[in-house]
Image (cartoon, rainbow, N blue to C red):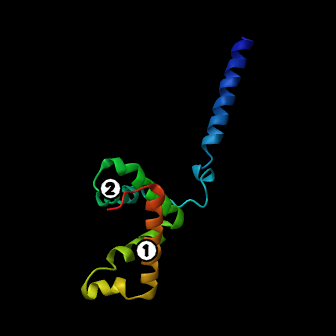
Amino acid sequence: MPMQSLCHARIALAMLCTSALSSIPLAAYADPDAHDYPTHIRVEYVQECIVQSGGKLANLYQCSCVIDEIAKQFTYDEYVEASTFSRYASLAGERGGVFRDPEEGRAKAKHFRDVESAAMKRCGVPEK
């Protein structure tokens, strides 16, 4: 009987430790400086990158590397704003002026393109 009690005590202790550790939020273990992007945004970026770099699925890892490098430089909100300015800066007409004309928008677009270009070189994405 004492052996059975000892065994139950060990199981109870293991369960207590497991529940205590599982109650600690995973965010406590995460790098506080890491910029987290929604998964669908990362997937969309990688898909566009693959298409732009020749459409070869072999570029999956390189394109994933690029978005990871970009995420090190921009918070998600900064990324959305800078990539939007960058993407639509060449939009013709009056509508494009919203993205082209503001000095702050041009600066954000240029910074985004510089970061993206450096990341593509670092990650080995083939040029178009």
N-terminal label among 2 and 1: 2
Which residue is at a point 60% across and 61% down the rendered structure image? 33
Residue 37 visible (yes or no): no
Other-residue count near label 1 (Cα within 10 Å), few / some / many at <14 / 14–19 / ≥20: many
Q: Residue at x 32, y 77 (%)?
A: 88
In percent of width and height, residue 122 lies at 48, 58
> Splitting the image into 4 quarters, where does residue 105 fall?
bottom left
- Tag 2: residue type? Ile
Badge number at residue 3: none
Element at label 1: helix
Q: What residue sits right under mark 1 in the picture?
A: 82
Residue reaching furthest right? Answer: 2
Viewport quadrant of the N terminus: top right
Q: Is 114 left or right of 89, judged from the image as shown?
A: right
Viewer-nearest residue: 93 or 113: 113
Q: Which label number is shown at residue 50?
A: 2
**Is 91 positioned to the left or the right of 37 in the image?**
left
Q: Is residue 107 above or below residue 70?
A: below
Residue depicted at x 35% and y 61%: 127
Direction from residue 109 to residue 5 in the image, left or right: right
Identify which residue, 47 or 25, lies in the foreground.
47
- Circle count: 2
